[in-house]
Structures are given as structure tokens and as C-alpha cells.
Image (spheres, rainbow, N blue to C red):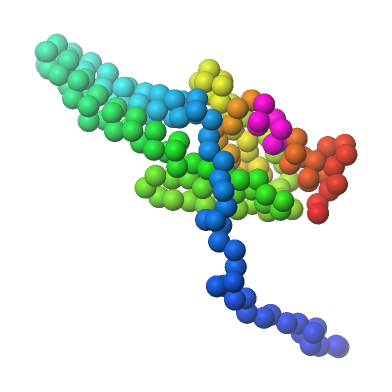
Amino acid sequence: MEDVAAGFRNAQVDVAGLPDVRDVSLEAVIPSYTRYSIVTNSAIGLAVAVAAGVGLGVGLDLRWGVLAAAAALVVVAVPLAVYGLLDARRFGWALRDHDVITQQGVLWRKATVLPLVRIQHVETASGPIERAFGVRRLQAYSAGSGSADLVVYGLGPDRVERVRQHLLRRIGQEPGGAGHE
């Protein structure tokens, strides 16, 4: 039997010479996504405020309920609205020749690079609140994943469709596509 490993080579890569993903110029979300993020985040705080107000208002006294609701607005809803603003401003994405990149996170930063050759399926999505703000998201899936491997938030309807069509052409799922390159 021939030695399979005879021609095998596994050279070390010079990490210092690799390109830095942080040097990529990222696209920002559309302005209405920032408003969407603020509203949806502060809605959670508003729900807490209403629940606190109703709970204490029914259990104790209406004045305590109003005071609890006001306190919850200041303590919960306002910080969540600020978090929504920061979260939208910290999200960025880039479409390159061979991959798609996203960077996100306020407290915990996350960078995702998904090579185009790994993408099996691309779809766009939007819930009713997103549609009210004119916001769409693009989701890219690779083989074997049960959920999206990469999500680009904060795209407008026209742009999300152009990016989706471009990716479908690149992965060969649309007439005229070149397949995996």
C-alpha cells in the first residue's frame, strides 16, 4: 500500500501577513433601521413599565402604580432605547468578491465572515414592524445549518433584493449564474 501522507504538506501560515478584516469598509444600516431598533428595544421597556404600573396599581394604590410605571420607564425603557441606538450604529456589513462580512454588538462584539462558496441558500425576511419601518434583512445559510449562518440587518427593500440576486447568481442558483467560483 502506498503511503498517502508522502506528498502531504501542511506549512505554517504567517499570521502577521494576513489581511485584517477590521480594515474592510463596512456598509451601515439604513436610517430607518436605527429608528426601528430604538422603538423595538424601548417597547420591551415600555411593556415592563406598564406591567409594573398595573401590578402595583391593582395591588396597592393607583399612585404607586403610576410611580412604578414612571420609574420603570426611566430605569428600563430609556436604557433599552439607547442600547437600540448603539446596536444599530455598531452593525456593519460588507459584500466582497469571495465572502460576506458582518460586524455587530454593543457589549459583545461579533464578526462573521461567510465565504460565498459555502452559501447554499439565501432569503430575505421582514416582520410586520420591520416592514412598517421599510426595513428588510438578508439571511444566508450554509450546508447543514438549521438557522442562518449570517444575517445582514437594516437593508432597504431595493438593496436587499439586489444583494440577494447578486448572491444567487454567484452561487449558481439563478439563470445566468456562474456557480461556485
Q: Which residue occupies 53% across, 43% down? A: 92
**The N terminus appears in which quarter of the rendering?**
bottom right
The rendered magenta stretch, by its main secondary structure, is classed as helix
Q: Residue at x 52, y 56 (%)?
A: 22
Quarter of the picture containing the C terminus is bottom right
Image position of 45 (left or right of 116): left
Residue 109 position within the rendered picture, expressed as x and y whole percent measured from the top left: 44, 50
Q: Is residue 104 above or below residue 16?
A: above
**At 37% from the left edge and 47% from the top edge, which residue is drawn?**
107
Q: Is 81 left, or right, of 146 in this rendering? A: left
Q: Residue 70 sits in which quadrant? A: top left
Left or right of 121: which side holds 30? left
Q: 52 or 104: nearer the eye?
A: 104
Confirm whether residue 44 shows in the render. Answer: no
Q: Is residue 169 magenta?
A: no
Q: Nearer the viewer, residue 56 or 107?
A: 107
How many tags in the picture? 0
Residue 169 position within the rendered picture, expressed as x and y whole percent measured from the top left: 80, 41
Q: Nearer the viewer, residue 86 or 61?
A: 86
Whether residue 27 can be seen here: yes
Q: Give coordinates of residue 71: x percent, y percent.
A: 18, 25
In which image quadrant can residue 76 be found? top left
Query: Residues in magenta?
Result: 158-164
- As displayed, is residue 128 above or below residue 162? above
